[in-house]
Image: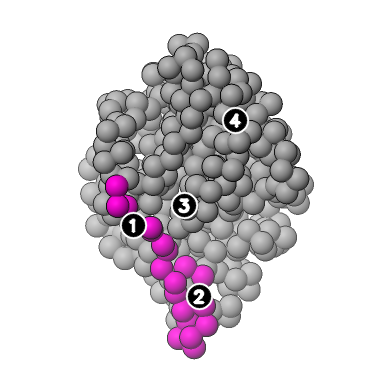
Amino acid sequence: MKITKLTLYRVPPRWMFLKIETDEGITGWGEPVIEGRARTVEAAVQELSEYLVGQDPLRINDLWQVMYRGGFYRGGAILMSAIAGIDQALWDIKGKALGVPVYQLLGGLVRERMKMYSWVGGDRPADVIAGIHTLREIGIHTFKMNGTEELSIVDSARAVDAAVARVAQIRDTFGFDIEFGLDFHGRVSAPMAKVLLRELEPYRPLFVEEPVLAEQAEYYPRLAAGTAIPLAAGERMYSRFEFKHVFQAGGIAIVQPDLSHAGGITECVKIAAMAEAYDVALAPHCPLGPVALAACLQVDFVSHNAVLQEQSMGIHYNRGAELLDYVINKEDFQIVDGYFAPLPQPGLGVIVDEERVIAASQGVTDWRNPLWRHPDGSVAEW
Ligand SMILES: O=C(O)C(=O)C[C@@H](O)[C@H](O)CO
Ligand SMILES: [Mg+2]
């Protein structure tokens, strides 16, 4: 079998789908994208396609090494997202060629269903109570929200109290009948993370995500030493070679590699195995589309330490399209009592509505995250 063509589609809300065609008529889909930098990743995929057209798509490991090592420079958000989407499409082709879901190619199921969670509250975490009520009615009991609005490197007790009050209100309303993670989203500096974690301790969130920015990873063990709250990170780390430092230093209880940013299935199953060796849980990051989610689920169902799966249904970013709008086999993504079942279709398990993708890609606008500024005019972490 030979790869014949790569085609990219940027579509609302902020996703990009890659279609890889072969000379035997089998097509694979991937989702290479960095939210807000889709065109940059598009260029990276186009450059990498020079190594792929004419090659055997079944030699995923060799193609991955060629893409990772062949251009001298390596790693980082853009290149690893381009590799990720290509890798997903190659696994999709291989599964379809052999007539099995990718998890079968990775050794088969380790579980019968995979627990998921939903976002509530948006960029500025408001209305979380209403959001939780709504989602509980459809059997979802695990949530994530932004832990705070923007914070200065050292901020006021009032700002800390506002963040804590929201969490207190959740516990007052729902007690411990629900669980939730708090995403600090990189908005919190090391000094403030220490303060916030201490004040949030009594409310026992399920985890605190990105307690500090990934470039401040040396603070993870120090912060962990001061709190019982499990710390989570990983969406802005892009390969085993970044995660290994976090495993060795300790402090992170849950790693969250993104299947569309951290080199795809080939890389993320290796990250999952490294995490298991350090007794670290896996909770793949996935605020993106259905192909990315399908790739996550293929890894979840073969990873013993997978505990939670993010998905974007109802997320505040999905303006102009929802998670399953481009999916034909919507029923396979049904959530039952807060869990996904293994995807039954061969390959990644998602049947893409190509006509709808092509139509949606016409005249699509480029998504950008907001640029926030502090009251003094300096740039704030969004
Ligand atoms: O889902 C999460 O955990 C996030 O932090 C969302 C963030 O990754 C945005 O997708 C960036 O545009
Ligand atoms: Mg996050």
Q: Amino acid at mark 3?
A: Ala
**Residue that label 2 marks:** 380
| First in sequence: mark 4 vs mark 2 | 4
Closer to the eye: label 2 or 3: 3
Distance between the alpha carbons at the discs numbered 3 and 4: 20 Å
Question: Is label 3's Cβ within 8 Å of ligand 1?
Answer: no
Q: CA distance from mark 2 to mark 3?
A: 23 Å
What residue is disc 1 on? 365
Residue 343 percent location from the top left of the image: 40, 23
Q: Residue at x 29, y 47 (%)?
A: 362
Q: Which residue is mark 4?
A: 52
Read off the residue under disc 3.
Answer: 38
Label 2 vs label 1: CA separation? 25 Å
* Mark 4 surroundings within 10 Å by alpha-carbon count, few (fewer than 14), some (14 through 19), many (20 or more): many
Which kind of residue does numbered mark 4 sit on?
Leu
Query: Mark 1 against mark 4, which lies toward the viewer?
Result: 4
